[in-house]
Image (cartoon, rainbow, N blue to C red):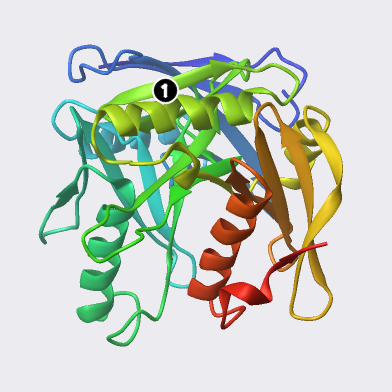
């Protein structure tokens, strides 16, 4: 592994005075093995320097100390010659758990404990959360704390917040669940996710890319026999600033879905599909329901709202 410091000459040099160049080609088979980690600083009586590697902070009183800490940390994060693809974060307990992708498997490790593996990220999160809550590491036994997912930036090794998720809920006890976070690429000119044993990616194109990626992943899951109907795969929790771009790529319709007296979802036309959009105000994110026609859309939305306990009968969701 090669490391060296570089003084930052970019526009952000006042907050990021140094860059740590890290090359790990000798200990990793990741496609990208050269990284440039920002080293920030703060002054609170004494100047301290910090770097963040996959969510783990290294801090010292000089950039050279931080570089030495990075040299010790990076090999500890490599598993099966790979750096983490994701990191699960327990917000209340401030603990982090690296998550790796290997072939068609996703796996998470625990310090001195078991390894949890599955083809679906959602299942790995479920297994890990159940285990951590059972042993009391995330609080009292039971699902007392949720694990949140972040991606690992393939240039800076910093954590990246998902811009939305692709999700499918199981329709029966023997059905598959699918849940995958979507991230911007390192150059922010495309969006990508991992699904059906591979990286799925589409170029940014004025908001059109969101449903294009959804469709690409749906077809890959159908070919992998992990999805039956294309429209079962939904766009979930889209960031509000991104929603404004996506909205411009769809045609608004005069109809709405209505339930619980006055709650309504706007409806849009997108190609041959109709899309109902829910604004989740508690998170300020947007989720989509997709259907072949108005009745298909109404029924799909009603089934999910029933599952969530927001309505008690499918007929309570109406088209107005």
Q: Residues within 10 Å of mark 1 (few under 14, many from 20)?
A: some
135 relative to 63, above or below: below
Give left or right: position of 21 versus 187.
left
SS at mark 1 in the image: strand
295 relative to 140, above or below: above
Towards the viewer: 25 or 307: 307
Res 130 quadrant in image: bottom left
The residue identified by callout 1 is 200
Towards the viewer: 222 or 8: 222
Q: Is residue 162 visible?
A: no
Residue 265 x %, y %: 77, 59
Towards the viewer: 304 or 72: 304
Towards the viewer: 208 or 190: 208
Instruction: Count up the numbered dots.
Output: 1
Quarter of the figure with the N terminus: top left
Residue 281 x %, y %: 75, 65
Q: Is residue 146 visible?
A: yes
Res 210 quadrant in image: top right
Residue depicted at x 31% and y 36% = 84
Residue 13 x %, y %: 72, 23
Residue depicted at x 21% and y 42% = 119
Residue depicted at x 17% and y 25% = 81
Res 193 quadrant in image: top left
186 relative to 241, above or below: above
């Amino acid at each position: 592994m090669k490391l060296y410091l570089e003084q930052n000459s970019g526009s952000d040099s006042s907050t990021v005075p140094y860059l740590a160049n890290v090359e790990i080609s000798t200990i990793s088979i990741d496609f990208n093995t050269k990284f440039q980690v920002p080293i920030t600083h703060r002054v609170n009586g004494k100047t301290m320097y910090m770097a963040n590697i996959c969510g783990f902070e290294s801090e010292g009183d000089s950039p050279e100390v931080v570089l030495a800490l990075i040299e010790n940390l990076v090999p500890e994060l490599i598993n099966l010659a790979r750096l983490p693809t994701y990191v699960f974060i327990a917000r209340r307990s401030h603990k982090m758990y690296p998550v790796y992708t290997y072939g068609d498997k996703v796996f998470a490790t625990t310090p001195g404990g078991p390894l949890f593996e599955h083809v679906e990220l959602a299942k790995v999160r479920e297994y890990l959360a159940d285990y951590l809550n059972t042993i009391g590491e995330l609080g009292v036994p039971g699902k007392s704390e949720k694990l949140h997912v972040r991606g690992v930036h393939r240039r800076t090794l910093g954590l990246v917040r998902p811009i939305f998720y692709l999700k499918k809920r199981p329709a029966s006890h023997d059905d598959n669940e699918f849940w995958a976070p979507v991230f911007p690429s390192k150059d922010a000119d495309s969006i990508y996710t991992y699904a059906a044993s591979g990286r799925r990616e589409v170029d940014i194109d004025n908001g059109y890319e969101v449903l294009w990626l959804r469709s690409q992943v749906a077809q890959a899951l159908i070919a992998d026999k992990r999805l039956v109907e294309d429209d079962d795969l939904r766009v979930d929790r889209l960031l509000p600033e991104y929603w404004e771009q996506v909205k411009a790529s769809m045609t608004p319709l005069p109809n709405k879905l209505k339930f619980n007296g006055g709650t309504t979802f706007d409806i849009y036309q997108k190609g041959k599909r109709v899309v109902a959009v829910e604004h989740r105000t508690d998170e300020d994110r947007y989720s989509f329901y997709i259907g072949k026609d108005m009745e298909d859309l109404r029924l799909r939305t009603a089934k999910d709202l029933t599952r969530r306990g927001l309505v008690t009968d499918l007929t309570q969701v109406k088209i107005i």
